[in-house]
Amino acid sequence: MRLLADDLSARRGEELIFRGISFGLSSGDAMVLTGPNGSGKSTLLRVLAGLLRAETGTAQVIEAEGAEPRPVREASHYLGHRNAMKLELTVTENLAFWRDYIGNFAGGEGIDIEHAADLVGLTGITHLPYGYLSAGQQRRFAMAKLLVAHRPVWILDEPTAALDADADAIFARLIETHRAQGGLVIAATHQPLGLRDARSLVMTGFEYDELEARL
Ligand SMILES: Nc1ncnc2c1ncn2[C@@H]1O[C@H](COP(=O)(O)OP(=O)(O)OP(=O)(O)O)[C@@H](O)[C@H]1O
């Protein structure tokens, strides 16, 4: 699989946040977005995931040589700052909702909810309401969402916020397994994620720089 981003720019309100972003990734690749607060990392991830409209440009995946390009959003999981789980539903109910709502992309299947819970180190508590869990446990189950439906592209915004060292290591392992199975990962982070051979995209927040220069 190839992922091609071509000449992306995006606006938030009146402000153009970035422009001219192009890159290509292949199966197994990881790319880490870094840059100061407000430089547009979350905005770019949301554009890739189809949650915000790009001002210009396209972001597409091509499954195999000669295949029709498809929007990245159809092939991706998005894990944002927030966990997007209902506090009053149980863990199982939340994960079942996301599994059914997101669905599998061609070429793979998600794993069983209990198995996903094991892999994030939280066996035996999926019957509890999500709201009963600690912040770290909630984040771990948000990671499990990536496993219950098969999507080859993982788009991750500050994925390890609220995680302890153990969970950091689990998450790094899940990402490496996903890559080894041909998946792609694009992550914004302020902390090292411990990813092997990750590419780097440094967001500069050019509008901000230009404004500063005029002051
Ligand atoms: N909903 C919104 N409406 C208008 N402007 C927004 C909105 N969300 C973000 N912005 C602006 O877009 C710019 C980029 O924000 P973004 O969240 O993409 O940055 P970031 O690099 O992810 O920052 P951080 O490191 O703090 O998470 C900022 O100037 C921010 O004020």
Image (tube, helix red, strand yellow):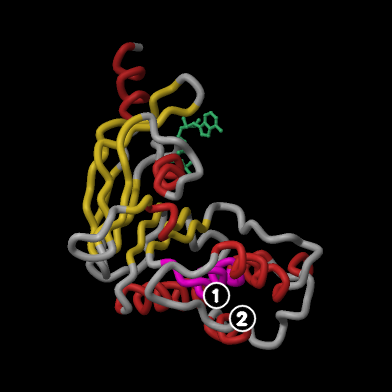
> Can you identify the residue that label 2 sits on?
113
Q: Look at the magenta stretch and give its main secondary structure.
A: helix
Instruction: Confirm or reject: label 2 Cβ below 8 Å from ligand 1.
Output: no
Give whichever of discs 2 and 1 has the lower sequence position: 2
Neighbour class for label 1 at 10 Å: few (<14), some, many (≥20)? many
Examine the rendered structure and indicate whether residue 29 appears above or below residue 204.
below
Residue 142, horizontal then vertical, whole percent = 59, 66
Residue type for callout 1: Val
Residue type for callout 2: Ile
As drawn, is 137 to the left or to the right of 152?
Answer: right
| Nearer to the camera, 139 or 68 | 68
Residue 186, horizontal then vertical, whole percent = 36, 57
Give the residue drawn at x 55%, y 63%.
102
Residue at the outermost top position: 215
Examine the rendered structure and indicate whether residue 150 appears above or below residue 122.
above
Using the numbered discs, state the Cα–Cα distance from disc 2 to disc 1 in whole angstroms.
6 Å
Disc 2 to disc 1: CB gap under 8 Å: yes
Residue at the outermost left position: 65
Give the residue drawn at x 42%, y 62%.
154
Residue 125 quadrant = bottom right
141 is within the stretch colored magenta: yes
Residue at the outermost right position: 88
Query: What range of the chain is rendered magenta?
Result: 140-151
Question: In the drawing, what numbered circle is on residue 148?
Answer: 1
Label 2 sits on a secondary structure element that is helix
As drawn, is 68 to the left or to the right of 85?
Answer: left
Neighbour class for label 2 at 10 Å: few (<14), some, many (≥20)? many
Give the residue drawn at x 28%, y 64%.
63
